[in-house]
Image: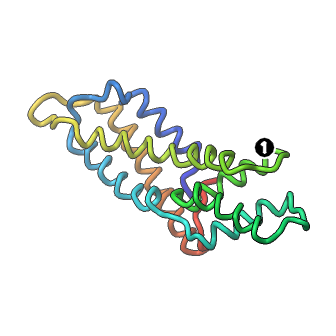
Amino acid sequence: MRASAAEILKTLEVWDNEYRIGKMPVVVDDNLKQIASDTRKQLAPVLQARVSKQWLKDRIMTLLMHWHNKETPQQIINAMSSDWIDVLQDFPQWAIEEAIVDYNKTSEYKPVPANIVKRAEQAASKYQTLDFKCKLIMQAGNTAKEKTTDAESKARVSAMMDEVRKNMTQHKDEEVKTGYKKLN
């Protein structure tokens, strides 16, 4: 099983209630900092993974085949492919795949690159937000010198982060078996 969007949002909901970005605690304990650090280490490969241009070209051509016109010259097809690659190449493969699947489920019109970019940004933003919040927690002061955080909220966040890390590990195992990443 992999970390689903619902699990990420559940974690973010807890963190939004406990650690709003504008109201992050000035002081957190070392255990929470360690959880945030471990989570960032696991998020890094997910956020930094990039797609191969060949995979991207093949995937875009597959997507556009639904609206294929046999009379379109090959040079135009190649130029269109290049446009798509230019705007999508910085996204992880799993985010592009999730974006395309979502587009195919929700739209009946031929896509333009911006349709997929928007959806890929939404897919990646869940992980980017979690990474940012972890970074803020790691930068907070040390409670040993100041005050402690609420033990119950810390335990809830810790349990949620353990579940996300577990699912991400399982997601990575599945990625190795299948050869590609995806969230849902």
Quadrant of residue 74 within the rendered picture = bottom right
Label 1 Cα crowd, 10 Å radius (few <14 / some 14-19 / many 20+)? few
Residue 38 on image: x %, y %: 32, 54
Nearer-the-camera pick, 130 or 14: 130
**Foreground pick, 136 / 158:** 136
Relative side of 23 to 125, left or right = left
Is residue 68 visible in this depiction of the protein? yes
Q: Quadrant of the N terminus?
A: bottom right
Relative horizontal placement of residue 41, taking residue 172 as reference (left or right): left
Image side of residue 80 versus residue 183, left or right: right
**Element type at marker 1?**
helix
Q: Is residue 18 above or below residue 50?
A: above
* Residue at far left of view: 145
Asked which quadrant contains residue 101, the reply is bottom right
- Residue at 29% across / 51% down in the picture? 37
Compared with 6, 79 (above or below) is: below
Q: Residue 100: image x %, image y %?
A: 70, 54
User: Is residue 180 rendered to the left or right of residue 155?
Assistant: right
The residue positioned 56% from the left and 46% from the top of the image is: 121
Residue at 29% x, 38% y: name it.
136
Q: Amino acid at mark 1?
A: Thr
